Amino acid sequence: MGINKLLYLIFWYIKIKFFNKKIPLQTVIFITNICNYNCKHCCVDKTAPTKMTFEEVKEHLIYSYKLGSRFVDFEGGEPIQWSDGDKNINDLCNLAKEIGFFSTTVTTNASKDFSFVNADHIFISLDGLKTHNFIRGEQAFENLSKNIKNFPSHNKVSANMVINSINKNDTQNVLNFVEKSPYINGISFNFYNPVNNDNTLCVKNKEEIINTIIKYKKKGYKIINTKTGLNYLKNPTFPKTCFITNFITADNERYSGCPNSPNHNCNICGLGMAGEMKALYDFSLETILSGIKLRLTK
Ligand SMILES: C[S@@+](CC[C@H](N)C(=O)[O-])C[C@H]1O[C@@H](n2cnc3c(N)ncnc32)[C@H](O)[C@@H]1O
Ligand code: SF4
């Protein structure tokens, strides 16, 4: 990490912590809500299929950069299937870098070959071994297993698991799978966030599951969530610092913080990011080092 980036991060922190400025550091852009899957837990409203144009994404990137954001995650729908004329996801990653973002990530369901994607980091959604297909559809696990092998830089690929009432007993299987896989560099965990206030997929023994994840982390398993962030997730009634990530949804709506917050009970938030942002705000060294490792080292 260069000195300029480090200085930027230090000044950003001083401004948010000591001058109470609500400046985002990360941006999540849902460039489309169109997807080839229909996962049981999915929070994306796909009733009116829509995708941003290249120019719209450009405007959102410039807007977010001017707000202060320096990290961008392209999401969907399925972002690697996004296109506008001859532009594809790589043009968006290149554009973000030209504008001045420090790093780009893309989150994909890994249903199709993603070996062409030039983002700095790629998250693939892995929701179980036995349960992945039940949640995501037939052949989803087989497709993911095939496509991760084709990606040229395995140290750039991490998994993301959303734990819910269907797959909670598969968590340790997933941990062992990732640990043994030469194609996946690490795994982050989230818990199901209720969609339309439907709690059916929420887990009741979240604390127990988090303690198990922490136990594996202490053993050295490649878990991206920090212990501090995971402990926050056990009881997410802590004061939120979600302004650290601004969101833009496929319908071009801009949110300071999470798009769920207006209609959602944030005291049951399952997003690992909420705990990590709080830990960052509290200057948890573990979280800072983990963030630098994930976002700013090659
Ligand atoms: C919205 S998807 C978009 C990217 C891509 N289609 C995929 O599935 O990876 C991004 C991530 O959000 C997760 N997600 C979707 N609905 C969720 C929910 N209700 N609660 C928590 N995470 C959710 C997905 O499992 C996925 O890892
Ligand atoms: S693949 Fe992603 S966007 Fe598509 S339905 Fe599943 S979670 Fe939603």
Image (cartoon, grey):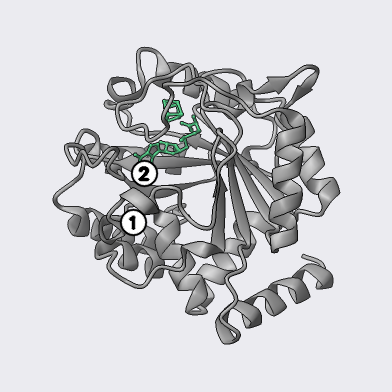
Task: Give residue 53's position: percent from left, percent from top.
Answer: 71, 27
252 sits to left or right of 181 = right
Task: Give residue 51's position: percent from left, percent from top.
Answer: 61, 25
88 sits to left or right of 109 = right
Residue ID at (38%, 54%)? 261
Is residue 297 in sight in this rendering?
Answer: no
Residue ID at (47%, 79%)? 282
Quadrant (top left/top right/bottom left/bottom right) for the N terminus: bottom right
Residue extending farthest to the bottom is 18
Task: Give residue 137's position: percent from left, percent from top.
Answer: 35, 17
Label 2: which secondary element: helix
Q: Are marks 2 and 1 in contact (CB under 8 Å)?
A: yes
Label 1: which secondary element: helix
| Distance CA(mark 2)–CA(mark 1) | 8 Å
Disc on res. 216: 1
Disc on res. 175: 2
Residue ID at (40%, 68%)? 240
